[in-house]
Image: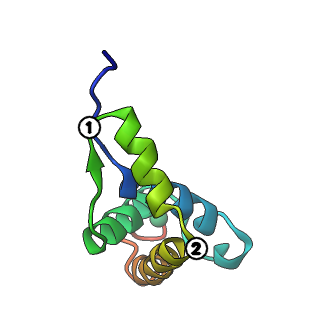
Amino acid sequence: MPQPILVNVTEEIVRGLVKFLLFGPEYQTFCHCEKCEMNILADVLNKLPSNYVSNEKTRSEVYKKLNTPIYINIVNKEIIRSIYNVGKNPGHTSLE
Ligand SMILES: [Zn+2]
């Protein structure tokens, strides 16, 4: 029997997209520290419905179901909004 897991598929998708956007050419001027990255992740994940799964089979099914241009577009919009929010209030001084 396969090992049970507990994964939020939304989180997996968001983590990848946050990295991609934050380290992309458009957001070079924003802080890239781990603190800000986690801040953005928490903010976005609080806005989007979670999609928890408990096994690999459902995980890949849900991943396929979510990985559509429409959904990715919604997620990207939330991430960009959060990048700007966190950029305005980084939660640390520029010296930290
Ligand atoms: Zn930072």
Residue 46 position within the rendered picture, expressed as x and y whole percent measured from the top left: 26, 69
Label disc, if present, on residue 54 of the rendered structure: 1
Circle 1: element type: loop
Front residue of this view, candidates 21 and 33: 21
64, above or below 74, in the image? above
Residue at position x 43%, y 48% in the image: 61
**At label 2, which amino acid type do we have?**
Pro
User: What amino acid is found at the position of numbered circle 1 in the picture?
Assistant: Ser
The residue positioned 31% from the left and 63% from the top of the image is 42
Q: Residues within 10 Å of mark 1 (few under 14, many from 20)?
A: few
User: Is 15 in front, or is 71?
Assistant: 71
Looking at the image, residue 46 lies above or below residue 88: above
Residue 77 coordinates in the image, percent (x, y):
49, 82
- Whether residue 18 appears in this view of the structure is yes
Secondary structure state at the residue bearing disc 2: helix
Residue 56 place in picture, x, y as percent? 39, 34
Q: Earlier in the sequence, mark 1 or mark 2?
A: 1
Count the numbered circles shown.
2
Q: In the depicted view, which residue is nearer to us: 79 or 1?
A: 1
Q: Quadrant of the C terminus?
A: bottom left
Quadrant assignment, res 11: bottom left
Looking at the image, which residue sits at the far top? 1
Residue highlighted by disc 2: 69
Crowdedness near tag 2: few (<14), some (14–19) or many (≥20) residues, C-alpha within 10 Å: few
27 relative position to 62: left or right: right
